[in-house]
Image: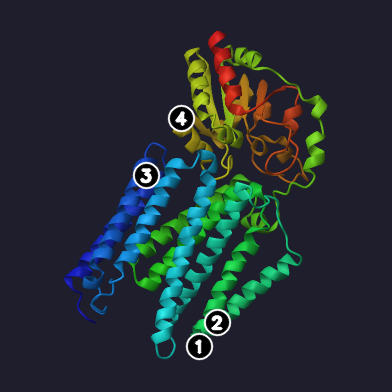
Amino acid sequence: MDELNIWQIATFFVWLVGSVTFILALKFLASPKTARTGNLLGAGGMAVVIAWTFLTYDLASPESEPGMLSNWWIILVGGVIGAVAGTLGARRVPMTAMPQMVAIFNGAGGGAAAVVAIAEFLEFADHGEGLLPLPFVIASLLGAVIGGVALTGSVVAFGKLQGIVTARPYMLPGQQLITGALFLTMLLIGVYVAGFENSIPLFLVFCAIALVAGVVLTMPIGGADMPVVVSLLNSYTGIAVAASGFVLSNYALLIAGTLVGASGAILTQLMTKAMNRSLFNVLFAGFGTAGGAAAAGEEGEEQLRETNAEDVAVLMAYGKRVIIVPGYGMAVAQAQGPVRELMDLLVAKGVDVQFAIHPVAGRMPGHMNVLLAEANVPYDRLKEMDEINDDFADTDVALVIGANDVVNPSAREEGSPISGMPILNVDAAQNIVVLKRGRGTGFAGIPNPLFSNEKTAMLFGDAKPSIEALVQGVKQA
């Protein structure tokens, strides 16, 4: 084996440093208090790895020809465009659209990993003699198929979250047969390309089928399951990046992709557990359909008891404990700021205020935590479902802000579309106030008997002006 030169040794060291920062970043991301530091640490480690690779590639790769980075300006221009897009996305995209941004950026990562795998295969298959090494071909195939599925699947998820594509599950005629045929075709092509002939045309057909598979797999999934889908596609992207790292013999990329893939898989498992459903059920059961929603929307309308902000403000101001349950409606209205002000006023009056966070509230994992952190709500007031569910029975007022499916008692009934899904026990509170923009159903498209509960009062209207009215009411109480 050829001796390593000084630049190769230095490269391995930089990769090691970068990998350590990725691992530490995940550790810091486990807590809201250190999440910002973890994010910066991971981004900084990746920036160091990228800069080192860009500046020392020729020196660290003796087998490369001088000037292999003569097209450096393409990389530079692409990097600038990506940096501008990322910065604008982070600063200008509202929190309501954050899930869409996560989905589309995740798709970009999967697509980039697929392009790397494809480019490496095409280069070596075009110049190589005989079959390429089997591990290299398998890694290229995996990078291409998983990255391709992550790309088009994320685009569909973006469309569903944005409302461009219907949130309802869309099943093709003979969906199972089509899905099975796609995967069988990819399997046969993959075996042939890996073991018999490194055919470039067949490899490109394989990649095209992977792109189609991403659409076919994601369209049948309902909008209510998008948090799980986004998490799963994130895991796909990590695996594709790891495969590309293997193809490139880049250990930093391999480790980073493995970490993302593993953490995404764990998060997906936690999300499905929070919904009391298997991943297979999420992917293939078509949950989230709005079928029957129109009829359900009218059912029990006469039984809904409306209230006003003044009465609700007095009820909360003179209570001992208030639990606020945030949902997507709070995100849509950008009401987290007024919610923080309402909390401060109640706490100043001696009221114990806590926030009940359901794992799948919102449109992405941790959506409510991010919103409330943005409004500087103290972390110790954010309680996970298992931690706070038993406290509802001793709560004077449960204030539900734009949440629906995660507080739906139908989950306790056999035969319900969300049967078995763990929910927040809001119906156990002494008084329930629901802030809701209209009388429609939630994202899952099913009625919610909580709204017609005799203890429930409905405060209709946009969440932000409703909360601002509550703030004024508490000040005067």
- Residue 135 shows up from this direction: no
Tag 3: amino acid: Phe
Q: Nearer the viewer, mark 4 or mark 3?
A: 4
Q: Are marks 2 and 1 in contact (CB under 8 Å)?
A: yes
* SS at mark 2 in the image: helix
User: Above or below — where is 338 with respect to 201?
Assistant: above
Tag 4: amino acid: Ala
If you read the primary sequence from the N terminus, does the residue marked by circle 3 or circle 2 appear first?
3
Q: Are marks 4 and 3 in contact (CB under 8 Å)?
A: no
- Would you call the spot at circle 4 few (<14 residues within 10 Å), some (14-19), or many (20 or more)? some
User: Above or below — where is 322 with respect to 447?
Assistant: above
The disc at residue 197 is: 1
Residue in the picture at 40% in, 55% down: 82
If you read the primary sequence from the N terminus, does the residue marked by circle 4 or circle 3 appear first?
3
If you read the primary sequence from the N terminus, does the residue marked by circle 2 or circle 1 appear first?
1
* Residue position marked by numbered label 3 in the rendering: 28
In the rendered view, does 35 fall on the left or right side of 351? left
